[in-house]
């Protein structure tokens, strides 16, 4: 079963604009992670945010987490053509085990 | 260099012919996991392991086996592959925190085609 659901499925913006992607999940979590994937290649970890954190920054990336709404957002500021990729959220579901559940991803296209 | 390696990177096989995809990590991570990625479905977890000799099912374990005899290796075994197992497979590893996994490091992927 898919827990993380990204929104939108696809996003096309101009270079320099900000890109916002959202992720919703169903069960309580220990942490939520965002990953990036360039067309069929391996995933690269971007940010991990723990369930007791509300916001985290890393360079041009800003992640928020709202556990009451079971949702997270990833903001990429001043986007570049090189940011073109698919972005996935993944939850470490707090179900007694250590399952990781990924969403279907958001495809971001940044036009130069 | 810290890394997760997978072999082979590409594999074309026929229905029913047993195969193994190897995964190895050099970061001394306790946690290892296998995922498959299909178009429009994101990554789905097949099996994971929290330590040597400890494995558990993910969301889509049917048709797969794993073993964790050594900490660094976590092979994925398809005893009798079928065409619906054609997919892109990723291995990942991470350290374990008190109540969760930490950042997962992914291998480069294995593209499997079953004819």
Image (tube, coloured by chain):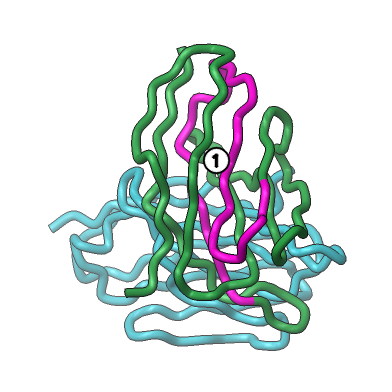
Chain colours: A cyan, B green
Residue picked out by circle 1: B36
**Left-right relation of B102 to B52:** left
SS for callout 1: strand
**The residue marked by circle 1 belongs to what chain?**
B
Tell me the residue at 63%/86% (across/down). A54
Residue A5 highlighted magenta (yes or no): no
Image point (58%, 21%), residue name: B81
Q: Residue at x 70, y 38 (%)?
A: B60
Relative image position of residue B93 (x, y in whole percent): 55, 64
Question: Along the horizontal axis of the image, is A65 left or right of B12?
Answer: right
Residue A1 vs residue A46: left or right? right
Q: Is residue A59 above or below residue B37?
A: below
Query: What's the magenta region?
Result: B67-95
Residue A65 image position (x, y, % from top left): 63, 77
Closer-to-camera residue (A106/B25): B25
Residue B9, above or below A37: above
- Quadrant of image for the N terminus of chain A: top right
Locate residue B1: give its quadrant: bottom left
* Residue A78 place in picture, x, y as percent: 26, 75
Query: In terms of depth relative to the viewer, which is nearer, B4 or B104?
Result: B4
Q: Position of residue A13 (x, y in %)?
A: 28, 57
Compare residues B43 and B113 and report the one nearer the observer: B113
Quadrant occupied by the C terminus of chain A:
bottom left
Residue A103 visible in rendering: no
Q: Out of B5 and A4, give the one closest to the viewer.
A: B5
């Amino acid at each position: 079963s898919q827990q993380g659901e990204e929104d939108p499925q696809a996003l096309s913006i101009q270079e320099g604009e900000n890109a916002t992607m959202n992720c919703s999940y169903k069960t309580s979590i220990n942490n939520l992670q965002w990953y990036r994937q360039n067309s069929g290649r391996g995933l690269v970890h971007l940010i991990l945010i723990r369930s007791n954190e509300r916001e985290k920054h890393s360079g041009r990336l800003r992640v928020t987490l709202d556990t009451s709404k079971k949702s997270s957002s990833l903001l990429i500021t001043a986007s570049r053509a090189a940011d073109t990729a698919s972005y996935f959220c993944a939850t470490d579901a707090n179900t007694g085990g250590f399952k990781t559940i990924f969403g279907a991803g958001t495809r971001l296209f940044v036009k130069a | 260099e810290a890394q997760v390696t997978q072999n082979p990177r590409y594999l074309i096989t026929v229905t029913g012919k047993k195969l193994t995809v190897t995964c190895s990590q050099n970061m001394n991570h306790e946690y290892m996991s296998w995922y498959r990625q299909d178009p429009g479905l994101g990554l789905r977890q097949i099996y994971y392991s929290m330590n040597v000799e400890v494995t558990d099912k993910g969301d889509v374990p049917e048709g797969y086996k794993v073993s964790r005899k050594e900490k660094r290796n976590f092979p994925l075994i398809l005893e009798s592959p079928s065409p619906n197992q054609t997919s892109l497979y990723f291995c990942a590893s991470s350290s374990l925190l008190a109540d969760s996994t930490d950042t997962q490091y992914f291998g480069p992927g294995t593209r499997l085609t079953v004819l």
